[in-house]
Amino acid sequence: MNPLICEWDTAQLLIFSDNSIPLIYYSHITSIIIFLCLFGLTFLQLKNWPKTAFRIMALSYSLWLFCDLVLWANDKIPHVMFFWTVINLVEPIIFIAAATFFYLFAEKRTINGLKAAHKWLIFGLVLPTLIMAPIGLSTVGFDMTSCDRNVYEGIAAYYNYFIEALCIIFIVAKTAIILGSKKYIGDRLKLSLIAVGMFLLLSAFLMANFFGTFLDQYDISQYGHIAVPVFAIFLAYITIRYQTFEPRILLIDTLVTSVIVLILSLFFAREEGYQIFITTLTLLLAVPMGYVLVTSIRKEVRTRKQIQSLADNLEQTNVYLGEANEKLKSLDKLKTEFLSLASHQLRSPLTAIKGYTSMLLEGSFGAVKPEQKEAIDRVFQSSTHLAKVVEDLLNVSKIEQGGLKYQMTQFDLEKAVKDLATDLSVTAQKKGLALNFETDSKPPYTINGDMEKLRQVILNIIDNAIKYTQEGSITVKLLHSGAGMIRIDVTDTGMGISPEEKEKLFQKFSRGEGGKLNTSGSGLGLYLAKQITEAHGGHIAIDSPGLGKGSTFSIELKEN
C-alpha cells in the first residue's frame, strides 16, 4: 500500500489533518469540551453527588474521543495500533462508571459507601479488558489492503459490547425499580431525567460503534455522540434545580475561563482577521462578565455593611441588655431581702397576737362574753392565717437566697401522712366531706428527708383539696410507684383544673380559678411544695379530667 496513492495528509498535533471528515471535529471536540466542563462542575459544592464515579466517566469519555480523533487523522501504523488499543481499554470503563454513577446518585452514596461485593463485581467486569488489552486480544492486526487504516479487533471488542449492553440493561432495570418504589418517591423526576440522559448517551454510543464495526462503515459511529448535549442539558438542569450551589458562580467561572482561552489564542493567531475576530469575541464575553462581577461585588459590599451594622447594633443591644439584667438582678435581690426582713419583722407581733388571743379564748384573763369570744376567735383565725402567709413569704425568700436549710432524717412516711389525714379529717367533716386514708399494703414506707418541711407540703395539698371541694370525698393514698419511689396521691371530687391552669399552677402567686372560691390563699403554697419536693429529689404533679371533674395531686419521693 503506497502512501502516495492513498494521499494521506500528515497529522498535526496527532488529531488535525484532511484525512478526517468535518463531522468528526464537531462531534468529538464539542463532546470533549462538554465533558470537561461537566468534570469541572464536580468541584463545586454539590450534595448527594458521587463525584469520583462521574469524574472517571467524564475523563474516560474525553480520552476515548481524543483517541478516536487520532485514529481518523493519523497515518502512522504504531499510532493507530496504540490508540485503538486504548479505545478498547477505556470504552467499557465509560459504561461501568456511568452505571455506577447512576446507582450511587439514586442511593445517595459515594464510592466509599459501596458494599465490598459491589466493588468486587465492578473489578470483575473491568478485569478481562485490563488483561486482554496488553496481551494482544484487543487489536490483533493492521489492515494493509486499504487506505482506511483500520485494525483487526480481537475478542476484547466483543466483550466490551457485552459489558456495555449489560450496563444499559442495569440502568433500565434500576429506573423501573425507582418508578415502582415508594423509597424514591421524592426523587423520581430528578432520577428519571438522569436515567433518560444516560440511556440516550450510552445506547447511542453503543449502537453507533457496533453497527459501524459490523458494517465496516465507521462514519456511522460519529452519530453516536449526538446525545452528549442532551445528556449535558439534563444534568445541568437537575444540578441547578436540585443541588445547592449558586449558578452565578458557575457563569462567572465559565466566562473567565473562556476569556483566558481567547486571550491565549491570540499568540497563535497570525492573520489580522483572526485577531480581530478573537478580540471582538473576547470583548463580548468580558462585558457581561464584568457586569456580573461588578454587580456581585457591589451587592456583597452592601450586604457586608448591613451585616456589620446589624452586628454593631446587636453588640450595643447586648450591652444594654446586660446592664438591664444587672439592674433586674439587683432589684430582685432587694425584693428578696425586703420580703425576708418584712417577714421577720411581722413574725414577732403576730406571735404575740396569736398568743394573747389564745389566752383570752381560754379564759386566762377572766371570763369572756359569748359575743366577745366570737370577735376574739376571728382575730385568732386571721392572725393564724396571716402568720402562715408570712411563713410562706419567709420560706420563698430563703429559697431564692439559697438559705433554706433541710434537716434530713429517716422517718416513716406512712405515720406522718396518716396523722395529717386524721388531723384534717375534722376540718373535712365540718364541710360534710369524707377524708379517707389508704395504702397499697406494701410497707415499709421509709424515706430520708426533712420531716417538718415534707409535712408542710402534704398538709398544703390535703388542705387545698378540702378548700376547693364542696361535696363528695377526698382520698389520700400511699403506694410504691416503682423504680425506688413512694407516691402520695391526694384525689378529690372538687372543682377540677383546666389544662391552661396546669401550666402555671406551681408558679409564685398563681391561684387559678380556685382563687375565686377561696380568697384566703397567698398563691405560694404549691410553689413552695414544688421547691421542697424537688430539693428532696422527688417531683410533684397534677392530673385533672377538667373543670368540675376533680383532680389528683401526686407527690413522689425517693424510698430509703
Image (cartoon, rainbow, N blue to C red):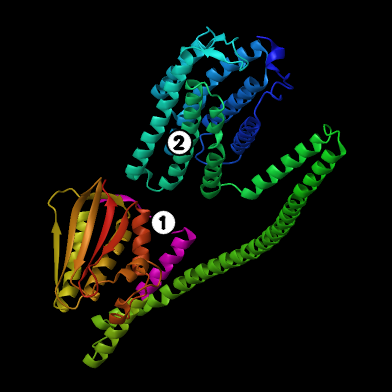
Residue span colored magenta: 387-412
Horizontal relation, residue 464 to residue 272: left or right: left
Which residue position is annotated with label 1? 405
The single residue placed furthest to the front in the displayed view is 5
Residue at 25% in and 45% down: 483
Q: Nearer the viewer, residue 452 or 60?
A: 60
Q: Residue 499: name its quadrant.
A: bottom left
- Whether residue 393 is in magenta: the answer is yes
Horizontal relation, residue 294 to residue 453: left or right: right
Q: What numbered label is drawn on residue 199?
A: 2
What's under tag 1, amino acid-wise? Lys
| Spatial CA span between label 2 and label 1 | 79 Å
Height in image: 189 above or below 125? below
Return the x and y of residue 408 as percentages of the image width and height.
34, 51
Height in image: 60 above or below 514? above
Callout 2 secondary element:
helix
Q: Nearer the viewer, residue 343 or 252?
A: 252
Return the x and y of residue 4 as percentages of the image width and height.
72, 13
Q: Residue 389: name its quadrant.
A: bottom left
Q: Residue 321: name its quadrant.
A: bottom right
Q: Nearer the viewer, residue 319 or 199?
A: 199
Residue at 62% in and 22% down: 67
Callout 1 secondary element:
loop
User: Can residue 404 be seen by looking at this rendering?
Assistant: yes
